[in-house]
């Protein structure tokens, strides 16, 4: 039996002209006025904004692999690589120019999330912290309906492990406005706490924040 060795694919990037309409928009209105899809269309040399599935623009900016990008946008492997490179440049610039917010307790979390518009869907965020209690990364990990949402606990813990984040906080809203913790909320806090403990990651809190009130399900802020 013989095996044919196939050489790995070579990615050759060729210069592509920016579409006239997107170029006109950028020159006339400035880059800040273009959407993410339009800016990525410029980067890729498309004649129109990049086609992104559903509400996936935020997730696209957090993508780490070609497969993740292609699952969120209509593009080729080569274009996905361009997108990953552009997004990583933006991340590095942002890290250099941004003073990381410090979270010393639940009030800091509430203050940050109260400044946002509240959605009619249940949204779950994870705040990943460094050892100085600075928020290094914020991730929208789940979008649900008006009364429920599914959270992938393994993905939350894996992300912290891959990037050596020692602590995290989970924040979610209740679209109906109540801060009464459901059985599912308590189960999430219990299971995520157990998973984090296995890898010496500190789960500081699981919080419910609404426009008028908030609730902490854990008391892990000491230390």
Image (cartoon, rainbow, N blue to C red):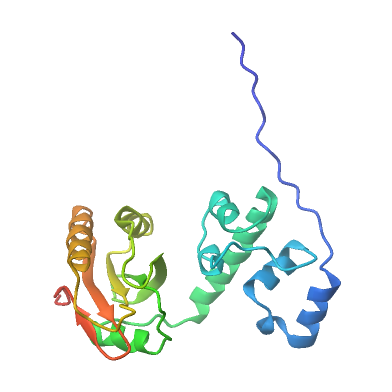
Residue 105 visible in the displayed image = no
Question: Residue placed at 33% from the left, 77% from the top?
Answer: 134
Nearer to the camera, 148 or 104: 148
Q: Position of residue 199 (x, y in %)?
A: 23, 54
Name the side, left or right, on which 82 lies relative to 211.
right
Tag count: 0
Query: Which image quadrant for residue 50?
Result: bottom right
Question: Residue placed at 78% from the left, 81% from the top?
Answer: 25
Name the side, left or right, on which 196 lies relative to 85.
left
Q: Position of residue 90 (x, y in %)?
A: 58, 71
Query: Which image quadrant for residue 120?
Result: bottom left
Q: Position of residue 22 (x, y in %)?
A: 78, 74
The correct choice, above or below, for 94 with respect to 78 in the image is: below
Query: Which image quadrant for residue 213?
Result: bottom left
List the single residue furthest toward the top. Answer: 1
Q: Position of residue 163 (x, y in %)?
A: 38, 59
Nearer to the camera, 213 or 40: 213
Which image quarter is the N terminus in?
top right
Name the side, left or right, on which 37 lies relative to 71.
right
Which image quarter is the C terminus in?
bottom left
The correct choice, above or below, for 137 with respect to 179 in the image is: above
The correct choice, above or below, for 105 with respect to 198 in the image is: below
Question: Residue placed at 53% from the left, 76% from the top?
Answer: 94
Residue 65 visible in the displayed image = yes
Question: Residue placed at 66% from the left, 83% from the top?
Answer: 32
Name the side, left or right, on which 145 lies relative to 87.
left
């Amino acid at each position: 039996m013989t095996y044919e060795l196939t050489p790995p694919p070579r990615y050759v990037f060729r210069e592509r002209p920016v579409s006239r309409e997107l170029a006109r928009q950028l020159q006339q209105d400035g880059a800040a006025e273009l959407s993410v899809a339009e800016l990525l269309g410029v980067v890729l040399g498309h004649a129109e904004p990049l086609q992104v599935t559903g509400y996936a623009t935020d997730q696209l900016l957090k993508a780490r692999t070609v497969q993740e990008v292609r699952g969120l946008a209509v593009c080729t492997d080569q274009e996905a690589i361009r997108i990953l490179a552009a997004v990583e440049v933006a991340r590095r610039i942002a890290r250099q120019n941004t003073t990381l917010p410090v979270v010393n307790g639940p009030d800091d979390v509430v203050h940050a999330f109260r400044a946002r518009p509240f959605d009619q869907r249940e949204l779950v965020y994870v705040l990943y912290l460094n050892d100085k209690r600075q928020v290094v990364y914020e991730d929208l990990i789940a979008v649900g309906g008006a009364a429920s949402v599914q959270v992938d606990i393994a993905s939350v813990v894996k992300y912290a492990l891959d990037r050596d984040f020692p602590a995290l906080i989970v924040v979610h809203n209740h679209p109906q406005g109540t801060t009464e913790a459901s059985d599912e909320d308590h189960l999430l806090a219990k299971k995520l706490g157990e998973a984090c403990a296995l890898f010496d990651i500190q789960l500081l809190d699981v919080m419910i924040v609404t426009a008028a009130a908030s609730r902490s399900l854990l008391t892990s802020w000491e230390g």
